[in-house]
Amino acid sequence: MRDEEPDGLPGEEGIVVLELGDVVDLHGFRPRDVPEVVRAALDEAEARGWRELRLIHGRGIGVQREVVRALLARDPRVLAFRDAPPEAGGRGATCVTLR
């Protein structure tokens, strides 16, 4: 007997459930999924009462960094954001302070 696919997901890629922490490395996500992952990280941080979050987006040419920061600039839960200290990723990561 063949394993059946979960309801509502025929032919789609499997869903991966990740437990988010206060550091989220975005390298493993498709660029189109990054905004959803960042929102989920903010949701989790809010639910857990965290005041700080670090998002690792990499240095590159800065496209991913700008996508992340544009989203953060519009989110009312975000008090401030800045480059991480050099030992925590520098320009390749963004530290977020939550309200």
Image (cartoon, rainbow, N blue to C red):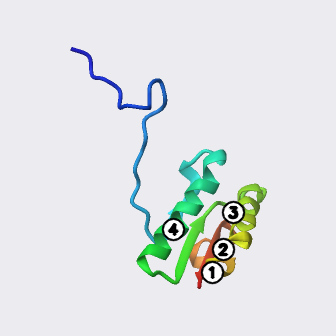
Position of residue 62 measured from the top left corner of the image (x, y, whole percent): 77, 59
Would residue 75 appear left or right of 21 to someone viewing this image? right
Task: Tell which residue pokes out farthest to the front in this image.
Answer: 8
Image quadrant in which you'd find residue 63 = bottom right
In the displayed structure, would residue 56 be above or below residue 5? below
Percent x, y of residue 88: 57, 75
4 or 1: tag closer to the N-terminus: 4
Answer above or below: position of 89 versus 66. below
The residue sitting at the left extreme is 1
Instruction: Give the mark nearest the N terminus, 2 or 3.
Output: 3
| Mark earlier in primary sequence (3, 4) | 4
Q: Is residue 57 above or below residue 3?
A: below
Q: Residue at x 70, y 64 (%)?
A: 71
Residues marked 2 and 1 touching at CB (< 8 Å): yes
Residue identified by numbered label 1 = 85
Q: Calculate the distance from the C-alpha at mark 4 to the C-alpha at mark 1.
A: 24 Å
Which dot marks residue 68? 3
Which one is nearer the viewer's eye here, 2 or 86? 2
Q: CA distance from mark 2 to mark 3?
A: 15 Å
Tag 4, which secondary structure?
helix
Residue at label 2? 90
Q: Which residue is mark 4?
A: 43
Give the distance between the C-alpha atoms of the residues marked 3 and 1, in whole angstroms.
Answer: 17 Å
* Tag 4: amino acid: Asp
Residue type, mark 3 in image = Val
Tag in front: 2 or 3 = 3
